[in-house]
Amino acid sequence: MFKFISRGNFARPIWVVLAAWLALGLAFFARANPMEPNCDFKSADADKKLFFALGMIESGNDDRGIGRAGEVSRYQIHPKVWKNYSGSREFENPEVSLQVAHQHWNHLTNYFRAKAGHEPTSFDMYVLWNTRFGYYARKGFHPDRLAAVIRDRAQRFLNLVDR
């Protein structure tokens, strides 16, 4: 049925199998890399950079910042949203505001995953953070459908995160 013709290339199939196995292994570990630009941000340094950039773009990291719509803390969280995560009114306390910001960020991440069906980028997350709930979903989660001012702010946020 099969003819086995030896031409000294017996090792070639073994190398092909090993190379494929190695490529699959590297692909798996590349996806598991915590520095990958998704929103899990398992690295403490990436987490610090992300929330530093968020506070900077929202209020210049001013713990006493109050937005036009009454948003509080350096992260400019609306008090109604704040109440979902904390009974504290220590809006000026950076540790409390960071804790609330983390919880809301995680909520938005889970919302995006459920609605869009994939992991959000930092751009996606900033759009969710900075717009009314549901706005980005109504735009089909397509950046090109966003208002220019929102796209520009999200890009500035990315620039700060990538510094």
Image: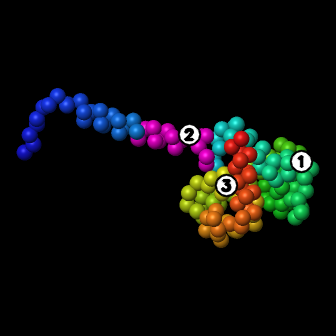
Residue 56 in the image: x percent, y percent?
A: 81, 48
Q: Which tag, 1 or 3, sits closer to the chain's start?
A: 1
Q: Which of marks 1 and 3 is in front?
A: 3
Q: Is residue 16 above or below residue 131?
A: above
| Residue 116 visible in rendering | yes
**Which residue shows up at 43% across the image and 38% down it?**
25
**Which residue shows up at 80% across the image and 60% down it?**
81
**Which residue shows up at 63% across the image and 60% down it?**
112
Q: Which tag, 1 or 2, sits closer to the chain's start?
A: 2
Query: In the image, what residue type sits under mark 1?
Result: Asp
As drawn, the residue found furthest toward the bottom would be 138
Q: Is residue 132 above or below residue 120?
A: below
Which span is picked out in magenta?
24-38
Report, in whole angstroms, how far the alpha carbon at label 1 lies from the one at label 2.
33 Å
Q: How is the rendered protein coloured?
A: rainbow
In the rendered image, residue 15 lying in the magenta stretch gets the answer no
Report, in whole angstroms, how far the alpha carbon at label 1 lies from the one at label 3.
24 Å
Q: Which tag, 2 or 3, sits closer to the chain's start?
A: 2
As drawn, the residue found furthest toward the right would be 64
What number is the disc on residue 123?
3
Query: In the image, what residue type sits under mark 2?
Result: Asn
Q: Nearer the viewer, residue 156 or 36?
A: 156
Q: Which of 69 and 115 is in front in this view?
A: 69
Residue 155 in the image: x percent, y percent?
A: 70, 54
Residue 1 in the image: x percent, y percent?
A: 7, 45
Quadrant into which the C terminus falls: top right
Query: In the image, what residue type sits under mark 3?
Result: Phe
Residue located beneath label 2 in the image: 33
Residue located beneath label 1 in the image: 63
Disc 1 secondary structure class: loop
Using the rendered view, name the quadrant where residue 153 is placed. Answer: bottom right
Report, in whole angstroms, how far the alpha carbon at label 2 lies from the one at label 3.
19 Å
